[in-house]
Image: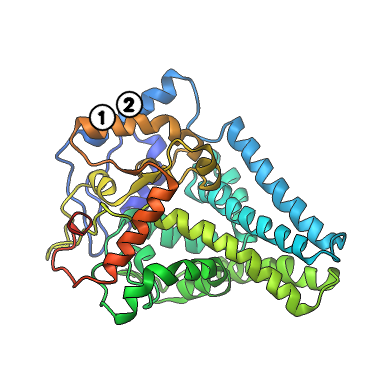
């Protein structure tokens, strides 16, 4: 990968005082020096919250309880499927598959996501061990570190740089992409595609990203040798857990097992896709484009405020099933803070944003975010390409 200063800064964040993103740059994109005190002031206020309340920025008893609960529910549903107790009740097996799929998503959103970011624990070894769970859920922590931690968090909503905008041609999720006739229907068929997203992820996406010569504008040719082994080893282990063992143990045909596997991924994929896309692909968020010198208009923190949105901040259900990523603004500003703290620092972020005249994008409810996402897909599917994408969210 190119020299992604962002990754190094965020890995060192807890050790740096004072911390601010001065001049973030890669091979082709760079962020200017901050001209506002917004982020230094916000950082100080957030740090004061943790200091004054004498609490850690990492996992607390709530997060540990949540972790145990998620793993327990996943394990119980998996065990019941293998037990053959309900083999005469296929509908109940499908229900167990659905619950198992949802909680596989929860493993990724709640445990794996925090662990790979390094926010679950202050101890590197703990985060590394918990990242293994991410692999056992079918994903790959190394590929995720590149595509998510580095590319998405660094180049949020920047076309051709943010890997999350790199979707199949049947979808147009950013205004720089060529408009096709089929895109006028994307707001309808996109939700079916979302049901396939996690299946595509565990069967194809990780391999494709790992062996791609470039990801976005970044070189992706060289990987540590051990990562080649880890990719295939953990993928094989995942396939054994979710396919081979059920085929050997459960009294169903192989094609019934495959259908159960697919059925679980319908719910897993929908859960994952909605959480990630409703945090960036909604009305009001921008698609900034570098100028001819490779510079982005806003400094890094201000850029995040223009490209990221919160939703359902007051919903305990959303907080559980979204892994705190309904507080996406807070997450992008403070990725090394465990997600269970986001609801507490969110008022600080909102208040400071208003004080400095910085946008704070939010959809009050899940339904509101879903409707906004759908409207954005409609408009992306029906308008002409704009030359200036930086204000796309406001002009549509």
The quarter of the picture where residue 15 lies is: top left
Mark-to-mark CA distance, 2 and 1: 6 Å
SS at circle 1 = helix
Q: Quadrant of the C terminus?
A: bottom left
Image coordinates of residue 128 in percent, x first then y, are 58, 50
Image coordinates of residue 213 in percent, x first then y, are 39, 77
Between 215 and 160, the one nearer to me in the picture: 160
Residue positioned 26% across, 29% down in the render: 41
- Residue 354 vs residue 132: left or right? left
Residue positioned 58% across, 73% down in the render: 203
Image coordinates of residue 287 in percent, x first then y, are 24, 59
Label 2: few (<14), some or many (≥20) within 10 Å?
A: some
Between 364 and 385, the one nearer to me in the picture: 364
- Residue 118 vs residue 251: left or right? left
Q: Which residue is mark 2?
A: 45
Between 224 and 317, the one nearer to me in the picture: 317
SS at circle 2 = helix
Res 18 visible: no
Between 227 and 85, the one nearer to me in the picture: 85
- Residue 233 vs residue 86: left or right? left
Image coordinates of residue 243 in percent, x first then y, are 73, 71
Q: Is residue 123 above or below residue 41?
A: below
Residue positioned 13% across, 68% down in the render: 387
Q: Which residue is mark 1?
A: 41
- Mark 2 and mark 1 residues within 8 Å of each other at the beta carbon: yes
């Amino acid at each position: 990968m190119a020299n992604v200063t962002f990754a190094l800064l965020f890995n060192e964040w807890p050790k740096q005082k004072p911390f601010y993103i001065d001049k973030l740059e890669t091979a082709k994109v760079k962020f200017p020096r901050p001209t506002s005190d917004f982020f230094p002031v916000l950082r100080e206020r957030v740090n004061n919250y943790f200091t004054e309340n004498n609490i850690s920025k990492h996992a607390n008893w709530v997060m540990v309880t949540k972790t145990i609960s998620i793993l327990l529910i996943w394990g119980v549903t998996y065990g019941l499927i293998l037990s053959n107790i309900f083999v005469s009740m296929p509908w109940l097996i499908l229900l167990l598959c659905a619950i198992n799929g949802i909680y596989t998503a929860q493993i990724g959103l709640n445990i794996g996501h925090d662990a790979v970011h390094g926010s679950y624990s202050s101890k590197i070894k703990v985060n590394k061990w918990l990242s293994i769970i991410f692999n056992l859920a079918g994903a790959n922590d190394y590929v995720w570190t590149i595509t998510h931690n580095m590319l998405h968090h660094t180049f949020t909503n920047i076309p051709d740089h943010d890997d999350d905008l790199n979707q199949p041609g049947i979808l147009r999720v950013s205004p720089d992409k060529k408009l096709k006739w089929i895109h006028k229907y994307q707001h309808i068929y996109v939700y079916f595609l979302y049901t396939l997203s996690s299946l595509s992820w565990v069967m194809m996406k990780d391999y494709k990203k790992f062996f791609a010569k470039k990801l976005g504008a970044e070189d992706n040719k060289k990987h540590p040798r051990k990562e080649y082994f880890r990719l295939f080893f953990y993928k094989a282990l995942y396939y054994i857990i979710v396919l081979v063992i059920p085929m050997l143990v459960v009294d169903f045909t192989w094609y019934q097992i495959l259908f159960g596997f697919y059925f679980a991924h319908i719910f897993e994929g929908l859960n994952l896709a909605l959480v990630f896309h409703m945090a960036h692909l909604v009305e009001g968020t921008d698609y900034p484009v570098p100028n001819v010198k490779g510079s982005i208009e806003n400094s890094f923190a201000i850029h995040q405020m223009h490209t990221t949105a919160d939703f359902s901040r007051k919903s305990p259900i959303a907080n559980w099933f979204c892994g705190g990523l309904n507080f996406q603004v807070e997450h992008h500003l403070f990725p090394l803070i465990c997600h269970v703290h986001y609801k507490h620092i969110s008022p600080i972020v909102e208040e400071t944003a208003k004080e400095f005249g910085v946008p704070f994008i939010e959809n009050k409810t899940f339904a509101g975010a879903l409707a906004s996402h759908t409207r954005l897909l409609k408009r992306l599917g029906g308008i002409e390409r704009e030359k200036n994408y930086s204000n796309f969210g406001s002009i549509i």
